[in-house]
Image (cartoon, grey):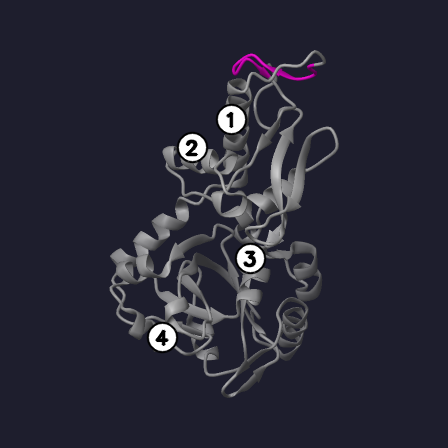
Amino acid sequence: MSVDVYIARGSEKNIHRSVVSGVERELVESVLGIPVPKESIDNFNCVRLWGVPRSDAERFWRNIKKGDVIVILPIKRSKKKFSECYVTIVVGKFPVNVTQSEIEKSEKLSRLVWEPYKKRQGIAESYPYIVFLNSAISIESIEDVLNILGKDIKVLLGYRESIQRIRKIPQKAAQELIQRIAKVPDTVTILTTLEEVYLETSAKLGWNIVNCYHYSTKYNTCYGAPIFLGNKDVWGSEGLFEELNKRLVEKGFKPITWEHLKQLIKSITKPGVVWASWYLSTYTNQVEPHDITIMMPLTQEPQ
């Protein structure tokens, strides 16, 4: 079966809510009354999904199928502002039978997840036609995706519907996008690599304390060192974040974003296990994680 490529458009806030961060699985399943596709559930038990409003785009939603590629593009006022998009694979849809009862459930969920969006034709108040997405989301530059698809920005801007099939896409291009999605590292890979570079950095700093509760003979260092996370755009200098991404690339994976790392740190922070110090960054004017302390093995075998 051939793979089609669709482009979806939406506000940055709505994209961040359901594509980048994901929606709580319990909320989605309790409202829709169905188990969501396993492929759409990430390691934080959140579901990646997108919604299509009542519009002419409904016909594209009806045709989209499992295995198709979807490129989600944040709506911008100027083409000069286009920079990144989100690429993933369709793993399911709802409503299943498009009954009135199902549509009422999906409309209820959409109002809990997404904000209304003002457009020329009026306000899209709900998005009852739901597309479940693979939890592996590849963040790509618009320029790279256009090059793969053999399209230019003018053609891209011509797709005005909230979701629409991109015409005349060779299967080779669709498969290249799928390969990029396959390189997105899962949580276990990220945690394993994070712990590796954390211990290596700790050893370089000569971190060894008297009361060492967890020691790595492999890296000849104690756990428990506060290690600077870095990110030059956030703290002005490089650190663990850059080393983590270098190592992921060496392993054949794509680098992760700062937002992804922040979400991961929040999820693993527990007393006696992981601690992170958060401070106000003068670069972003937001509270950001500054350093991380791993106090016991996360994925490494106890030594």
Residue under circle 3?
48
16 on left or right of 249: right
Residue under circle 2?
247
Q: Residues within 10 Å of mark 3 (few under 14, many from 20)?
A: many
255 on left or right of 277: left
**Distance between mark 4 and mark 3 Cα atoms:** 25 Å
What amino acid is labelled 1 in the image? Answer: Glu
**Distance between mark 1 and mark 4 Cα atoms:** 43 Å
- Dot 2 or dot 1, earlier in sequence: 1
Label 4 sits on a secondary structure element that is helix
Whether 248 is among the magenta residues is no
What amino acid is labelled 2 in the image? Answer: Arg
- Residue 297 screen position, x and y as percent: 62, 24
Question: Split into 4 quadrants, where in the image is the N terminus?
Answer: bottom left
What amino acid is labelled 4 in the image? Answer: Leu
Residue 33, quarter of the rendered image: bottom right
For marks 3 and 1, give the one nearer the viewer.
1
- The magenta stretch is 212-221
What amino acid is labelled 3 in the image? Answer: Arg
Q: How crowded is mark 4: few (under 14 residues within 10 Å), some or many (20 or more)?
A: few
Residue under circle 1?
196
Helix, strand or loop for the magenta stretch, by majority = loop
Whether 213 is among the magenta residues is yes
- Residue found 51% across the figure and 34% down from its top: 240
Q: Residues within 10 Å of mark 2 (few under 14, many from 20)?
A: some
